[in-house]
Amino acid sequence: MTPEPPARRPRGLRALRGLRKPAKKRPAPPPADATSDRPAAPAPTADTAGSVINAALYRDGRRVSTHDTLADTFQQLRATPDTLAWIGLHRPTPAELITLASEFDLHQLAVEDALEAHQRPKLERYGGTLFVVLRAARYLDDAEEVDFGELHVFVGRDFVITVRHGGAPDLSAVRRRMEDAPELLKRGPEAVLYAILDAVVDDYAPVVSGVQNDIDEIETEVFGGDPRVSRRIYELSREVVEFQRATRPLNGMLENLTAGFEKYAIDEELRRYLRDVADHALHTTERVDGFRQALQDILTVNATLVNQQQNAEMRALAEAGFEQNEEIKKISSWAAILFAPTLVGTIYGMNFDHMPELHWGLGYPFAIILMAVVCTSLYVIFKRRDWL
């Protein structure tokens, strides 16, 4: 019996605390009156069939049976030696994962990660079981955005279990590819792992192309002055960062996996296939890193163009304000010039009886000359000050 870690309390799968490792993996079915020290696995729930996407047994690279439930798969696997079980699940229930953990001796921490999802890409080995977390991606043309999914893979001596969270990747295509190449499939669970890795990395190519097209469109919008481009740059930058988090750990994971293949004497041909996947992953990582730098440069250029546009608008406003001030000065100058004769005419238009100038013979010419002199003087003054 393997003791459970005393200081670790599972966050989402506390029922695993009662699991015991079986003394022997998948023994032959005992007689009806025999007893076993293996704890009874929880009975599959009603939604088990809905979570099991595909469960099949393979021998020498060819499918020998297909099952709709985990219980049928386990029963046939025990009764059929030298077979490989390939089980595909989509968002399984805790009861299903407990059943799998009991049957295949999966580590408690790995099962907990597979249940909770939202894990970073990683590669862990628990005894004879390899646990791989991958972040798959696909490009949605209609929405022009990247959709990320999460895939957990358990690889053992004679089993492969995939737990998928999200729409990507399409593992049915991987299964068809492997079934069409029995010479590759009969190389064992590591060949299935290679095919899954290859599919995930190959699915990055359309995403890279889609993001590149988005960046090209953003560059056009930036220089076209589209006011909505800043928001699009921000949203695409977030997707690129998420894409970077999905692809960057792959290089180290594949290196560690290659080292493990050598340690466990895995077929040399599989190592060549794996190196090809590593090359594609490295190329994708370099492209994604370039996208992030390109978006940073575009954001800088966009900020510069926005500042230039704002400066041009401020300059135009300043020029408009200056022209308005000039017009106000002209209006004020003419108003002052016209105010002088209006003032004189208003005073003498009051028709007072005791105004000396009313009975003066030169009063009228004097008033006209006075108004003309005042108006002329004001005009000269305003003209010298460039108000007119």
Image (cartoon, rainbow, N blue to C red):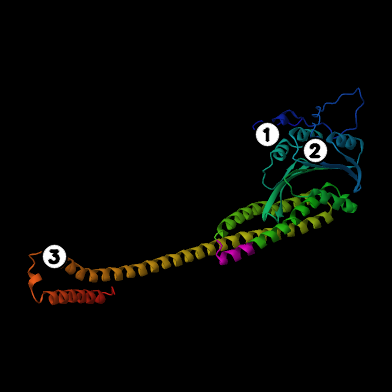
Q: What is the distance, in whole Å, between disc 1 and disc 3 at their CAs?
A: 104 Å
Instruction: Identify the main secondary structure in magenta.
Output: helix
Which amino acid type is shown beneath numbered disc 1?
Gly
Q: Tell which circle, 3 or 2, labels the residue nearer the N-terminal end.
A: 2
**Type of the residue with mark 2:** Gly
Residue located at (13% from left, 75% from top): 364
Instruction: Identify the residue at horizontal 70%, vertical 40% (top origin).
Output: 113
Please report whichever mark, 1 or 3, sits nearer to the chain's N-terminal start: 1
The residue depicted at 81 percent of the width and 34 percent of the height is 103
Q: Residue 317's x, y, as percent?
A: 41, 65
- Residue linked to disc 2: 50
Estimate the x, y position of residue 235 in percent, counting from the top left. 60, 54
- Crowding around mark 1 (Cα neighbors within 10 Å: few <14, some 14 to 19, many 20+) is few
Depth order, front residue of 378/91: 378
Q: Quadrant of the N terminus?
A: top right
The residue segment tinted magenta is 215-226
User: In the drawing, what numbered circle is on residue 12?
Assistant: 1
Q: Which mark is residue 387?
A: none
Q: Where does residue 238 sit, x and y in percent of width and height?
A: 61, 53
Residue 107 picture quarter: top right
Comparing marks 1 and 3, which lies closer to the viewer? 3
Residue type at the position of mark 3: Asn
Element at badge 1?
Answer: loop
Residue occupying image coordinates x 84% and y 56%: 269
Q: Given the current orientation, which residue lies at the most extreme top position?
A: 33
Residue 14 in the figure: left or right of residue 383: right
Q: Which residue is mark 3?
A: 351
Is tag 2's residue or tag 1's residue first in the polypeptide sequence? 1
